């Protein structure tokens, strides 16, 4: 085949249609902030109600045949009473977690990541608020815990609050997203068979 025939049969590069660039996914800051605000608001309101109605030696409230007890306790440690006695360290750690999450928010284009990080941020801020404003002092405040499962004294499962629940749910969702290969920018970190990348 001559060069002339090749030129006729093969379209030039200029004739090939240009592939349009993939549009950037919208940022999920609104969803992220809404989830964080909701988690924080529910936690703060619940603690105010609990401190007003279940404090001062009030007997625990039994629900669902004893599956859940509502009882106020004060926790100097982390979620589920872990790390009691290290309140100042936990306060500083909470500030660091909040700072890291806010720094990541600018790259957030995944719905799943927005929900997960919003839950973690709202929960961290909820417990951090207690550490700053509750007794015995700023940075050393004890967190209000009030949900006990299967026993009123927390011996079956440590007593917790809504902030702890938000942090744990957010962390589990982050783990699922990581296992599924979904990045914070909404794209998959690895190619899936027969399907698009990420969400």
Image (cartoon, helix red, strand yellow):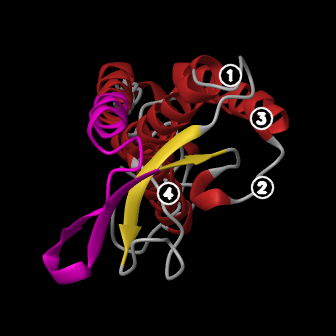
Sequence-wise, the earlier of marks 1 and 4 is 1
Q: Nearer the viewer, residue 118 or 75?
A: 75
Between residues 183 and 5, which one lies in front from this camera angle?
183
**What residue is disc 1 on?**
99
Q: Position of residue 118 (x, y in %)?
A: 42, 35
Q: Crowding at label 4, few (<14), some or many (≥20) Cα neighbours within 10 Å?
A: some
Q: Between marks 2 and 4, how big is the CA–CA gap? A: 16 Å
Q: Position of residue 40 (x, y in %)?
A: 38, 29
- Compute the Cα span from label 3 to label 2: 12 Å
Q: Residue furthest front?
A: 57
Q: Which residue is mark 3?
A: 93
Q: Is residue 23 magenta?
A: no
Q: Quadrant of residue 32?
A: top left
Secondary structure at numbered mark 4: helix
Q: Which residues are magenta?
A: 44-72
Circle on res. 182:
none
Residue under label 4, please give it: 168
Circle nearer the N terminus (3, 4): 3
Magenta-drawn stretch contains 52: yes
Crowding near the residue tagged with mark 3, few <14, some 14–19, many ≥20 C-alpha atoms within 10 Å: some
């Amino acid at each position: 085949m001559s060069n002339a025939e090749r030129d006729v049969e093969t379209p030039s590069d200029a004739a090939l249609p240009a592939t349009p660039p993939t549009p950037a996914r919208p940022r999920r800051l609104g969803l992220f902030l809404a989830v964080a605000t909701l988690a924080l608001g529910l936690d703060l309101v619940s603690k105010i109600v609990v401190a007003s109605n279940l404090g001062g030696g009030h007997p625990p409230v039994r629900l669902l045949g004893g599956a859940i007890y509502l009882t106020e306790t004060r926790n100097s440690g982390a979620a589920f009473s872990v790390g009691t006695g290290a309140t100042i360290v936990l306060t500083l750690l909470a500030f660091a977690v909040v700072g890291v999450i806010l720094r990541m928010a600018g790259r957030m284009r995944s719905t799943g990541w927005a929900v997960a990080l919003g839950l973690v941020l709202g929960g961290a801020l909820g417990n951090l608020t207690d550490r700053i404003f509750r007794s015995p002092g700023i940075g050393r405040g004890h967190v209000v815990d009030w949900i006990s499962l299967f026993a009123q004294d927390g011996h079956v499962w440590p007593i917790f609050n809504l902030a702890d629940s938000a942090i744990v749910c957010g962390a589990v969702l982050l783990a699922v997203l990581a296992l599924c290969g979904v990045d914070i920018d909404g794209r998959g970190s690895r190619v899936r068979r027969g399907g698009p990348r990420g969400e």
